[in-house]
Image (tube, rainbow, N blue to C red):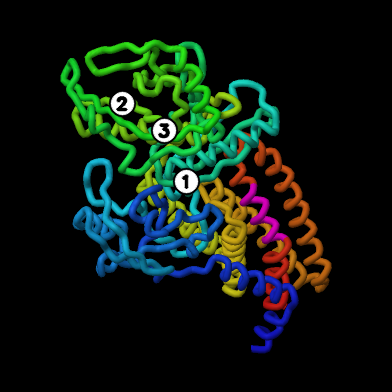
Amino acid sequence: MATVKKVLGNWRVIILLVFLLFAIIAIKPNPWVEGVMIKNVITNSSASDAGIGNPGPNVVPLAKERVTSVGGMDVNSVKTYYDTVSELEVGETVHLETNEGSYTLLIGEDELGIADLGLKVYVAPTSNVRKGLDLEGGTRVLLKPVEEISEEDLEITIANLKERLNVYGLSDVIVRQASDLSGGDFILIEIAGVTEEEVKELLSKQGKFEAKIGNDTVFFGGKKDITYVCRSADCSGINPSRGCWQVEGGSWACSFFFGITLSPEAADRQAELTSKLEVVVGEGGAYLSEPIILYLDDNEVDSLNIGSELKGRATTDIQISGSGVGAIKSEAATDALQNMKRLQTIIITGSLPVKLEIVKMDTISPSLGKEFLNNAVLIGLLAALAVSVIVFLRYRKAKVVLPMVLTMLSEVVLILGFAALVGWNLDLASIAGIIIVLGTGVDHLIVITDEVIRGEVLTDWKQRVKNAMFIVMAAYFTTCAGMIPLWFAGAGLLKGFAFTTIVGISFGVLIARPAYAAVIERLLK
């Protein structure tokens, strides 16, 4: 008992315990969390109209809003939520409970006419440790400007991409600048829970949208010329006047529409250009002699006839239309609505300062990410067990093995606590970094133990511990020096590995391993 008191009273051990306490507070493990986490709130949906907001990207996982019941039915899984919502009647109201309050929602419908509240949910996390795409599932995109770009334009591009993805309905997004060892500029985007097809065109297109009458531009996409873009059901969706129709070959096409509001300056340009046109009378009525043609990245999207009543008028309300195709009618309708949503997003955010090309795109399904996590945990446990057995065979003393295992576990807790505190996403590269930390940690702990055991014979305990810590510190600086190039290599894709390794061995060398030296010295002495 006296030995335990002396061990716990050592200042190095006290520092380790304090850091472990703060790490656990940061992680805040809660295996009994209820409900499902709100991932995205669709704009102009029932949930949005009721006042439910998108979760902020910097909000810790356990602080995000969770749905706990819908219509009096408890929600304890993602499947339960969607099954409950699918049974609701469109047009009625439903009471929704979250961990932050109660809401009354008017039940809407999705593009296929199925009851929908406008919420995308996922499994509620049980701690504040954020999982990266490798473990959570989603898409990682590496973009590169096709030409030289200034630092200012690069920042504008990143801000524009963030706005595009948020407007598109994606809130759990990381967009950051990256570079390689040769100094090339890249943009790394990580989007949890979406597929490759949903974001590929949105990110690769420069998004230069303009409307022309003849060779003259009437307005450009962006907030300067367009003050409002309708995305609600009453002024956007499948065009009721054209609908869907079958084309040659048996495939289908559907037309979409949505309204926009021009700025007074853009409306004046339209009035000036239309005043020079002639009125032409045809089967569909009276139109001006030139249509207004819509271009996206210099490719024609659609051509709209201009009614004769708009000749010389500075009107601010314009209707944009387009189409989508598919093998069957429902596929065509879905394609049309996706094209509409993408075009709305680009019109709202405007064009990028430079065209981007997709260098690399990886998509991982949530089920595969879960399998990766389970395998990583299993391998970690097996590695810890193997190390424990080998160390026990080496020293034949439980009072050596137990502190060594506890020290390794404490280093893992410190890494996870720091990651939760700073909002760092743990992915497979980070897990590899943790394994490297544990590997170097075992080496260092064995060096410390051997030096202390030699001190039993040579009686110079303090000198032996100093010798051991000198070796540990030399290995620490060598490892850090090796990790710094990896921080920038691969356009930042190895940053998680380098960051986790540096943080882990820093906690180990500065906090956990000195505490182990104090403990093992006391126990063996």
Q: Residues within 10 Å of mark 2 (few under 14, many from 20)?
A: many
Q: Position of residue 86 (x, y in %)?
A: 22, 54
Precedes in sequence: disc 1 or disc 2: 1
- Closest to the camera, between mark 3 and mark 1, is 3
Residue at mark 1: 133
> Image check: 464 left or right of 292?
right
Q: Identify the residue at horizontal 49%, vertical 28% (top origin).
A: 267
Q: Identify the residue at horizontal 48%, vertical 49% (top origin).
A: 172
Q: Identify the residue at horizontal 22%, vertical 14% (top origin).
A: 283
Q: Position of residue 344 (x, y in %)?
A: 42, 34
Residue at mark 2: 323
> Image check: 471 left or right of 437?
right
Q: Identify the residue at horizontal 45%, vertical 70% (top origin).
A: 30
Precedes in sequence: disc 3 or disc 1: 1
Q: Calculate the distance from the C-alpha at mark 1 to the C-alpha at mark 2.
A: 33 Å
- Closest to the camera, between mark 1 and mark 2, is 2
Q: Amino acid at mark 2?
A: Ser
Secondary element under disc 1, as helix, strand or loop, is helix
Secondary element under disc 3, as helix, strand or loop, is strand
Residue range of the region highlighted in magenta in the rendering? 499-509
Q: Position of residue 261 (x, y in %)?
A: 45, 35
Which of 120/46 is in front? 46
Which of 440/255 is in front? 255
Q: Residues within 10 Å of mark 3 (few under 14, many from 20)?
A: some
Q: Amino acid at mark 1?
A: Leu
Point out the residue furthest to the bottom here.
1
